[in-house]
């Protein structure tokens, strides 16, 4: 353990050295994207990475005027490779790997060898053309590391410490090439910890459950909509069909978006955000004028479809880390959302019960709903201004087919929700609350 701590501390120190000159000069790099391949073979793992020289100003590469000097770069390249090996962490089952072989060279900005793994490896193996002219900070440093591994079936993780002080500005694009499986690509922010390239299903599941909980707890608009749903209800029984309808509805659109069935175009994300704000305003106004709580599950299901698209935007960038466990990750994310909702409800319902003791019930519903409506109205206006500036799609044959499919899917979903709501109504009948005080008996006719 002390040795591992020392290596990790040394890695962070070396990574900071590579980028400390950027922070000291307050001169941020213009190219912050690194490209890499990770290929797994029966007994070896290969990391082939291209790093913009703009991120490596801490390295002492020889210059000739305002250009790098390829003829004198050999010793400097060999000195840079161990530093870069510490800047990239490749782990097998949690144990950091040490490269047994390494090679590297400078490359021009116009070089396109990293479009393919074999081309990138072949290019790095070639001797440097001494007549090449590379302007200061405008080229790349290409490196190839070979690591001995125990098994190609292990769980491999990667982490970059290059430019660690720049946080999420730095991006590492990794194309993972496992043995006897189809490859996949992912983009890892610089402030991420070790990211599993081929996570086990239970690792993917646990990670996406946590992601779902974090998303619902940090999504203020979703929480405000949930708050609007529960304001008029006094008992949890009446909420069962409403929460069930919301869960089923947002699950439908969440899964559809994950499988690329959602409408395309720049107009759709701002439309969804505007519709979410509209759902908050509508629910708040319905509470004020007096809602039919027995039919609330229906409108909740309609708005749940919209919120599902909103959930999918938070999930979109994270699905790349699911590996080959897409369905498991989707279900786990959904479970995380439901766990977060239950936690929020567990706090909301007692707080509302206490509030009703201090304020008359009808007045309390109106006050709370008016506050929520005011907030939702401002969000709706702000998002509508963004939506107005986007170009709407043309209603061609393809759009009509997509609309017909979604209409059929929605009708099917609402039919299933209606049957489920009726079953829940029989299973958990709502109690009829009688007014307080004595009940007057009708007078008998003389």
Image (tube, rainbow, N blue to C red):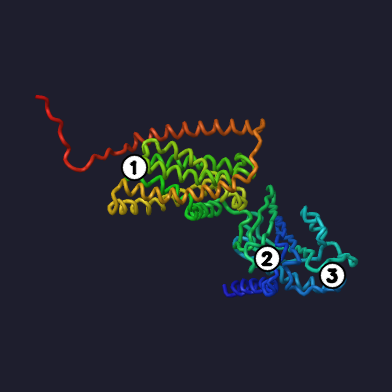
Q: Secondary structure at mark 2?
A: strand
What is the number of the mark on residue 206? none
Pointer 3 residue: 67
Pointer 2 residue: 88
Q: Residues within 10 Å of mark 1 (few under 14, many from 20)?
A: some
Asked if residue 129 is positioned above or below residue 346 in the image, the reply reads below
Q: How far separated are the C-alphas under marks 3 and 1?
A: 74 Å
Q: Quadrant of residue 78?
A: bottom right
Which quarter of the rendering shows the C terminus? Answer: top left
Pointer 1 residue: 237
Question: Which residue is more in the foreground, 432 or 190?
Answer: 432
Q: Residue at x 61, y 53 (%)?
A: 321
User: Which of label 2 and label 3 is nearer to you?
Assistant: 3
Residue 25 location, x and y as percent?
Answer: 70, 74
| Precedes in sequence: disc 2 or disc 3 | 3
Question: In this rendering, would 112 be left or right of 186?
Answer: right
Q: Is residue 309 visible?
A: yes
Q: Secondary structure at mark 3?
A: strand
């Amino acid at each position: 353990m002390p040795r591992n701590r020392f290596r990790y501390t040394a890695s962070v120190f070396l990574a900071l050295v590579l980028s400390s000159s950027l922070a000291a000069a307050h001169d941020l790099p213009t190219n912050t994207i690194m490209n890499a391949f990770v290929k797994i073979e029966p007994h070896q793992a290969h990391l082939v990475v291209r790093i913009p020289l703009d991120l490596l100003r801490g390295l002492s590469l020889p210059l000739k005027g305002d250009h790098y000097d390829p003829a004198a770069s050999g010793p400097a390249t060999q000195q840079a490779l161990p530093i870069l090996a510490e800047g990239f962490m490749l782990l097998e089952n949690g144990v950091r790997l040490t490269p047994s072989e390494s090679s590297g060279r400078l490359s021009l900005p116009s070089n396109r060898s990293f479009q393919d793994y074999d081309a990138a490896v072949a290019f790095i193996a070639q001797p440097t053309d001494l007549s090449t002219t590379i302007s200061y900070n405008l080229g790349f440093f290409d490196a190839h590391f070979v690591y001995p591994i125990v098994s190609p079936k292990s769980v491999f993780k990667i982490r970059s410490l290059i430019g660690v002080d720049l946080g999420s500005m730095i991006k590492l694009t990794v194309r993972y090439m496992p043995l006897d499986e189809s490859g996949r690509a992912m983009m890892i922010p610089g402030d991420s910890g070790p990211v599993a390239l081929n996570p086990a299903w239970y690792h993917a599941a646990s990670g996406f459950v946590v992601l779902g909980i974090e998303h619902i707890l940090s999504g203020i608009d979703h929480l405000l909509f949930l708050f609007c749903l529960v304001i008029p209800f006094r008992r949890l029984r009446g909420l069962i069909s409403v929460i069930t309808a919301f869960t089923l509805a947002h699950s439908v659109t969440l899964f559809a978006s994950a499988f690329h069935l959602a409408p395309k175009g720049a107009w759709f994300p701002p439309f969804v955000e505007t519709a979410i704000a509209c759902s908050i305003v509508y629910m708040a106004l319905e509470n004020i004028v007096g809602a039919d709580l027995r039919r609330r599950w229906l409108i909740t299901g309609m708005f749940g479809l919209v919120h599902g698209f909103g959930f999918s935007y938070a999930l979109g960038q994270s699905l790349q880390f699911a590996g080959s466990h897409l369905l498991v990750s989707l279900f786990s994310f959904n479970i995380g959302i439901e766990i977060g909702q239950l936690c929020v409800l567990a706090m909301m319902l007692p707080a509302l019960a206490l509030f009703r003791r201090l304020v008359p019930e009808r007045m309390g519903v109106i006050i709370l709903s008016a506050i929520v409506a005011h907030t939702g109205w401002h969000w709706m206006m702000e998002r509508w201004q963004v939506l107005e500036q986007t170009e709407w799609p043309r209603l061609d044959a393809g759009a009509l087919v997509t609309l017909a499919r979604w209409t059929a899917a929605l009708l099917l979903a609402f039919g299933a929700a209606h049957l489920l709501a009726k079953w829940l109504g029989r299973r958990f009948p709502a109690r009829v609350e009688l007014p307080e005080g004595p009940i007057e008996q009708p007078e008998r006719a003389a």
